[in-house]
Image: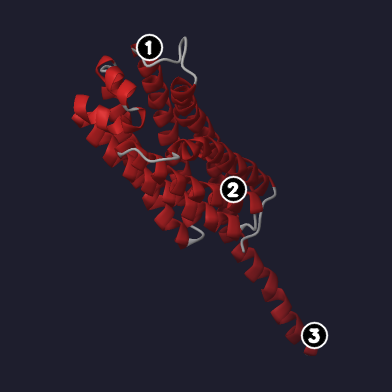
Amino acid sequence: MSGPAATGPDASAPAATSTMAPVSAPSREGEVKGLGSLGTGAGVGLAGGIVGVVLPILFLWLTTHNPGGFFTYNATLIDTTGYLVLAGAVLLFLSLFLYRHGFSALRKVDGRFAIASVLCIVGSIGFLLILVSAAILVGSSSSLIQCLHQSPTGALSCIRSGQPLGADTGLVGFWLGWLGGFGIVVGLALAGRRYRNGAVQGGAALYAFLLLVLIGPFLGLLTSLPGIDYLLLAVPVFIVLGPGLVLGGARRARLGHPTSA
């Protein structure tokens, strides 16, 4: 009689295991898809940062410190910069959408990703406003040139004097986009900790530094601040390294089929 009694619990154990497998498999699939979206969002964000931030800052810096040829304050330069910002805003908007999609997928296995997903939605609204602002400014470059000649660091004041709607829309868009960036920091920090991925955690830290650094140049658009050029030079570094780390880290985590922390 001891034989059947002993085999009873043993027989029930495989049955319990088999009922759990269908539950864990979809969760793992959602995690893999979420990590894939984070990696794609980082790649699109990297492209958007180069097009919409690095190149315009480089052009304006060269125009201020080494003017000549194309790099002079004229309609061509302003229009080109405006188109670059417009294209970069489109890419960054798509990046936020992909990040939100990734955080939304990960939220199904960890509810803490919900706040990151919501903040990315807020940031997407901000980038839509930046798109509207950039579109307004592209068609009004000539009125900005003389003002920028007199005060390059007072760009926002120049924009407001010629296109108040574009300036105010850009202001609101900037801060909403900043909140979206904060959502990315929160989500990436959670993902890096959950999957014990140092590259994703490093990318979250660089995104956080970028948000802090962006406040300085933004204040420089409102008023003249000494040494603001050095902060502007730091922006391209963070906006390239941050998503670059996330891109590599998310890809490795996805291919490695990570276990949750």
Q: Earlier in the sequence, mark 1 or mark 3?
A: 3
Q: Kindly state the secondary structure of the residue where label 1 is placed.
A: helix
Residue type, label 3: Gly
Q: Which residue is at a point 79% across and 89% down the rendered structure image?
A: 2
Res. 224 in view? yes
Between residue 114 and residue 190, name the one nearer to us.
Answer: 190
Work out whether residue 105 can be spotted.
no
Residue linked to disc 1:
76
Residue at 38%, 12% in the rendered image: 76
Badge 3 element: helix
Pick whichever, 78 or 3, lies toward us. Answer: 78
| Above or below: residue 7 compared with residue 220 | below
| Kind of residue indicated by mark 2 | Val
Q: Residue at x 43, y 51 (%)?
A: 183
Residue extending farthest top: 69
* Closer to viewer: mark 3 or mark 2: 2
Residue 32: mark: 2
- Residue receiving disc 3: 3
Residues at marks 1 and 2 touching, judged by CB atoms closer than 8 Å: no
Q: Which mark is residue 60?
A: none
